Image (tube, rainbow, N blue to C red):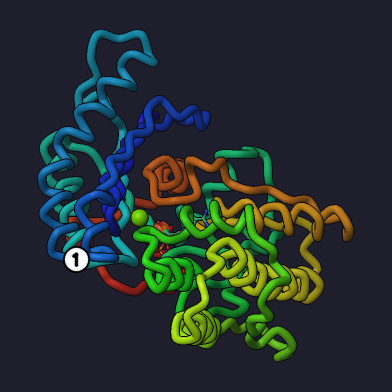
Amino acid sequence: PLILAIESSCDETAAAIIDGEGSMLSDVVASQIDFHARFGGVVPEIASRKHIEAICGVTDECLDVAARALGRSRLRWRDLDAVAVTYAPGLVGALVVGVAFAKGAAWGADLPIIAVNHLEGHLYANRLAEPDIQPPMVVSLVSGGHTMLVHVKDWGDYETLGSTIDDAVGEAFDKVSKALGLGYPGGPIISKYAAQGDAKAIAFPRALMHSGDLRFSLSGLKTAVTTYINKEREAGRELNIPDIAASFEAAVVDVQVSKAHTALKDTGARTFCLGGGVAANPALRGAYEAMCKKHGYRLVMPPLSACGDNAAMIAEVARDRFAQGKFADWSLDVTAHAPLDEPY
Ligand code: ATP
Ligand code: MG
Ligand code: FE
């Protein structure tokens, strides 16, 4: 089968086409970051409008690329076997563009629709790196809106072991970047500076590191960093941005790795995976490589291109749903929040 998947939950308009064997025939991502950057974050109203502008072009290009991959002159909607779409969680005004478009296209071409949870997509991004990975596994999902450890008992059977009680990790990177006047999104900027800094220069707090559970807290760390920045400025000292970035990043990484290790011990899983935009962070990836090597866990990480939002990961989920014959009906609607533990 050929499945076209659409993703529009935040500020990426994306479409991908996958075949039944898992070959990704096309993978198109149009980012809106430039339109949001000057506001220091994603503006929901702008995101919706940009999705409307982009979605026809993105899906047309997606069909063209897949046609070329198949050696055909063109691929039409009715040559497909299903249309998949992210229905939750995310910005409702952004999600609704993808879902309405997917429904219209599917109705017009007489195709079934498949509803995909965005977070499940981030879990499946690991299969784009290593198609043969098998649950049970522990996945750390670290993105702009989420920070959680998930026990994947089977594909489709998830238990959230713990999550953040305040900010998400990506959000903390974004806020620290903003406090340093470095722009949005903060993750890539901060990690670049961090690579040149001394991670031991400043002792930032490791919140809930020894709490004995798998909850996270990031807002105190963000406050500690901004307080430090303000004090240095008041004292008239020049900020050492690489040291601040490296010390902040180390505080995040230490807690993430420690809790991931606890989750692996608690569940008995021997495979560890990552997901979400922050999974692209080199320090985090390096620390997980060391931890997994030391304790003999299999480590799988999404390709860098599939850490942030994309439709390839949604297509990979849809491939399983199609094989199971699990389709959505025409009443499919969007929701801002949808727990992974109860997939659609
Ligand atoms: P969610 O998936 O929770 O709905 P989202 O889709 O907005 O949220 P993603 O697109 O998965 O989030 O990830 C975006 C986040 O990843 C941003 O906060 C960004 O700063 C962060 N990020 C991207 N690259 C890096 C990096 N190299 N280091 C740290 N953070 C990063
Ligand atoms: Mg994004
Ligand atoms: Fe995401």
Q: Locate the C terminus by quadrant.
A: bottom left
Image quarter of residue 271: bottom right
Is any part of residue 289 visible from this angle?
yes
Of the pair 4 and 144, the residue shown nearer to us: 144
Residue 71 position (above or below residue 125):
above
Is residue 236 found left or right of 76 in the rendered image? right
Q: Whole-percent x and y of residue 283? A: 66, 56
Residue 117 position (above or below residue 134):
below
Is residue 128 found left or right of 103 in the rendered image? right
Q: Whole-percent x and y of residue 54? A: 16, 41
Classify the position of ligand 2 by quadrant: top left, top right, bottom left or bottom right.
bottom left
Of the pair 300 and 323, the residue shown nearer to us: 300
Q: Locate the N terminus by quadrant.
A: top left
Residue lying at 50% horizontally and 85% vertically, measured from the top left: 235
Residue lying at 18% horizontally and 56% vertically, measured from the top left: 330
Is residue 285 found left or right of 23 in the rendered image? right
Image quarter of residue 111: top left
Residue lying at 13% horizontally and 64% vertically, measured from the top left: 45
Image quarter of residue 29: top left
Q: Whole-percent x and y of residue 34? A: 24, 49
Tell me the element at label 1.
helix
Q: Residue furthest bottom?
A: 211
Residue lying at 22% horizontally and 59% vertically, measured from the top left: 38
Residue matched to label 1: 44
Q: Whole-percent x and y of residue 161? A: 62, 77
**Which amino acid does the dot numbered 1 rest on?**
Pro
